[in-house]
Amino acid sequence: MIHLPPLDGRAIWLAIAAFLAGVLNAVAGGGSFLSFPAMLGTGMLPVQANATNTVALWPGQLTSIAAYRDDVRKYLRLAILMGFAGLVGGTVGAIVLLNTPQTTFLHLVPWLLLIAATIFAASGPISRWIERRRLRDNPDRREGGAAQAQHMPNRTLVFILTAVVCFYIGYFGAGAGFLIITLLSLFGFNDLNEINALKVVSTTMANGVAFLIFVVSGQVEWRYCLVAMVACAIGGYSSASLARRVPQPVLRGTVIVIGFGMAAWFFWKNR
C-alpha cells in the first residue's frame, strides 16, 4: 500500500514545483529544473530523486505522440528507427544511472543542470536560425522535389546520434529534447511539426524504457511520485490559457534563470 507523504513544507513545495513543471513543460519546456531539485528536497537520495522525477513526468509526454500522429505516419520508418534508438539509448542511460554511486551523481548534478540550462538558453537563437533556414530553403512552402530529398538522411548516422542523445535522456534528460530538434534540423528537416513529431517519438521511448527500468528496480519513491504526477498533470492541463497570455520570451527567460540558478545553488551546496 502506498502512503501519501506527510503534509509538511517539503511535500507542499514538491506539489507546487511539480505543478509549475507541468506548466513549463507544456508552454516552454524545462520543467525538470524545478521538479528534480524539489524531489531532492524531500530527502530522497540523488539517484532515486532522478528516477522518481522521470517516472512522474513521463505520462504527460506519452500523450504528446497522439498530437503528432499524422506527421509520425508520414515518416513512419524514420520514426520507428528513432524510437528504437530511443529505447537503446534510454536503456543504457538508465542502467548507468542505477550503477552510479549516490555521491558521484550528487556531484554531477550541478554540471548536468548547467549543461541543460545552456542547451535551453541556446535553443532560442538556434530555433530562429532553423526558421530562417526553412524560409530560405522553402520560401513558398513547396512540397516534393528537393524539399523531400532533404528528408532522407543517413539512417545509420541518425540512429547512432539519436541513441547518444537518448543515453543522456535515460541518465538525466533535462533539455535533451532540443538536442533532437537540432539534430534533425542539421539533417535537413525544416518543418517544425515534423521535427517535433520525430522528437516526441524518440524522447518518449527513451523516457518510457527508463520509466520501466526505474520501476522494476525499485528506485521510485511512489508516495512522492504520485503527488508530483498529479500536480504536473494539472499544471500541464491548466497551462493553455497561460500560454496565450504570457509572451514566450518571458517564459523562456524564466526557465533559463531557474536553470542557471539551480545549477549555481548546487555548485554552492556541493563546495
Image: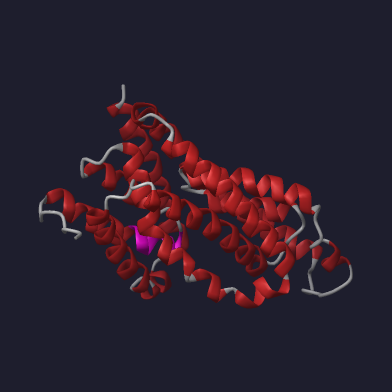
Judge left or right: residue 33 versus residue 78.
left
Image location (x, y in percent) of residue 147: 83, 67
Magenta span dominant secondary structure: helix
Judge left or right: residue 124 versus residue 97.
right
266 versus 13 height, above or below: above
Residue 24 falls inside the magenta stretch? yes
In front of the other: 121 or 144: 144
Q: Is residue 254 visible?
A: no
Q: Is residue 95 visible?
A: yes
The mark total stands at 0
In front of the other: 133 or 73: 73
Image location (x, y in percent) of residue 108: 42, 30
* Residue name at image x 47 percent, y 51 percent: 210
Image location (x, y in percent) of residue 61: 46, 64
* Residue name at image x 48 percent, y 44 percent: 94
How is the model colour-coded? secondary structure
Residue 103 falls inside the magenta stretch? no
Judge left or right: residue 172 versus residue 156.
left
Tell me which corner region of the image, top left, top right, bottom left or bottom right, holds residue 133. Answer: bottom right
Q: Which residues are magenta?
A: 21-28
* Residue name at image x 82 percent, y 60 percent: 152
Image location (x, y in percent) of residue 255: 40, 51
Say which quadrant the C terminus sits in.
Answer: top left
Residue at the far top: name it: 271
* Residue name at image x 64 percent, y 56 percent: 84
Residue at the far right: name it: 145
In front of the other: 43 or 267: 43
147 versus 18 height, above or below: below
